[in-house]
Image (cartoon, grey):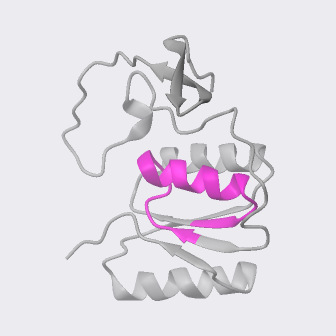
Amino acid sequence: MNLDYKYGNKGYKYDDDIGLEITKYHILAPEQEQDKQPGMEYEMTPQPIFDNPNYKGSGKLKDKVAIITGGDSGLGKSAAIAFVKEGAKVVIPYYNEHKDANETKECIEKLGGECLLLAGDISNKNFSKEIVKKTIDKFGKINIFSIKQIVF
């Protein structure tokens, strides 16, 4: 996937005597609406920007295992990518957005990360137990649990 950053304008922000270079982005995107929830990220035009290609992780999460609910798209996808760049292995439980989930997994693997996808409904107690069991079975531990949303 090619990301388009052409709207970036270099500028400077001054904090005391230290000048920090910043980039301002003017993102022009049409309003979008989907008639089902959760929405399908792959149907969006333009595609959301989920990664900063200039950000290089520093290994802060090396050998950690993170469960990121909803990590297949949107903010959850951004979190999953950032965790992987920091060295974590990720488990992504998602509802029914299979295409989005597989695209996210491909991106994670291109970055050299490991990803386990689990489709199901996190409001179902049995599925939630399955997430924990399959994570332990594959990676041997859980260090981080990031909940994108909870359904009551």
Quadrant where the C terminus lies? bottom left
Rendered position, 39 above or below 13: below
Verify whether residue 88 appears in magenta: yes
Rendered position, 95 above or below 104: below
Extreme residue in the front direction: 17
Q: How many marks?
A: 0
Residue 46 location (% of width, % of height): 42, 21
Quadrant where the N terminus lies? top right
* Quarter of the image where one finds residue 138: bottom right
Residue 97 location (% of width, % of height): 42, 51
Q: Residue at 41% across / 88% down in the picture?
A: 126
| Left/right of residue 47 with respect to residue 104 in the rendered view | left
Q: Residue at 45% across / 32% down in the picture?
A: 48
Verify whether residue 76 appears in magenta: yes
Q: Nearer the viewer, residue 6 or 89?
A: 6
| Left/right of residue 85 with respect to residue 148 in the rendered view | right
Q: Nearer the viewer, residue 90 or 83?
A: 83
Q: Which residues are magenta?
A: 67-91
* Quarter of the image where one finds residue 58: bottom right
Residue 95 location (% of width, % of height): 39, 62
Q: Nearer the viewer, residue 103 or 90?
A: 90
Q: Residue at 56% across / 17% down in the picture?
A: 4
Rendered position, 53 above or below 99: above
Residue 45 location (% of width, % of height): 38, 22
